[in-house]
Amino acid sequence: MPRGKPPPPQQAIHSRLSFLHQASSLLSTSPTTAGLSRYYTSHLLSVSKKSVQRLSTPVKHTLCKRCSSILVPAITSTTTIENKSKNGRKRWADVVVVECRYCGKTKRFPTVDREEVKAKKEKKTITTTTTTSTTTANATTTTMREEVDGDAAMTGT
């Protein structure tokens, strides 16, 4: 039994899921084939559940949970940006709202990535720490100078 290699991923199932998503998104553009598109999407969801394959986040964002239709902007869904903070002052509070035109279900997604917010917080923390360290170093240097000056005054030099 080879130890170093992991088992190969389920390539056939991945190909099937990809095909079902592509077929569903292609058929969703025409109103006459919307029912077939929904069938392919529901089949996609059932295959992914049975095979215990997680769908990627961008794929999940394009699916309606209520009616299993593909959410194509301006065709099967409407997209708006909301900011419910006080007078829209907080830019990081922007939310993309996608509404399904078939069933009316809304999905809300933040516009700012969590990684960006974490990176900004870390950068701010590093800057604050550096400033504090610099201030502490300056205070230490000043204290040392005063001690040296005090020693010089005591010795009379």
Image (cartoon, rainbow, N blue to C red):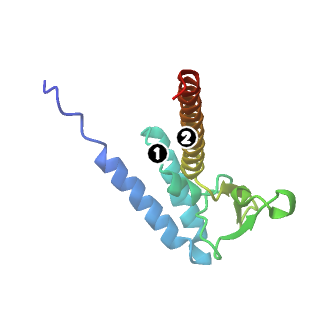
Could you say whether the residue bearing mark 2 is in a helix, strand or loop? helix
Please tell me the numbered disc located at residue 116.
none
Q: At label 1, which amino acid type do we have?
A: Ser
Give how far across and how far down residue 82 sits, in percent: 76, 63
Would residue 109 appear left or right of 88 to someone viewing this image?
left
Residue drawn at 47 percent across, 51 percent down? 56
Q: Look at the picture and state if 149 lies above or below 49.
A: above
Q: Quadrant of residue 143 in the image?
A: top right
Please tell me the numbered disc located at residue 134.
2
Mark 1 against mark 2, which lies toward the viewer?
Answer: 2
Residue drawn at 64 percent across, 59 percent down? 111
Give how far across and how far down residue 136 sits, in percent: 58, 34
Label 1 vs label 2: CA separation?
55 Å
Could you say whether the residue bearing mark 1 is in a helix, strand or loop? helix
Give how far across and how far down residue 29 sits, in percent: 56, 76
Local crowd size for mark 2, using a 10 Å CA cut-off: few (<14), some (14–19), many (≥20): few
Query: The N terminus is located in which quarter?
Result: top left
**Earlier along the polypeptide chain: callout 1 or callout 2?**
1
Q: Quadrant of residue 64 in the image?
A: bottom right
Q: Look at the picture and state if 152 lies above or below 138.
A: above
Looking at the image, do the residues carrying marks 1 and 2 touch, with CB atoms under 8 Å apart? no
Q: Residue furthest left?
A: 1
Which residue is identified by label 1? 48
Q: At label 2, which amino acid type do we have?
A: Thr
The residue closer to the viewer here, 137 or 129, is: 137
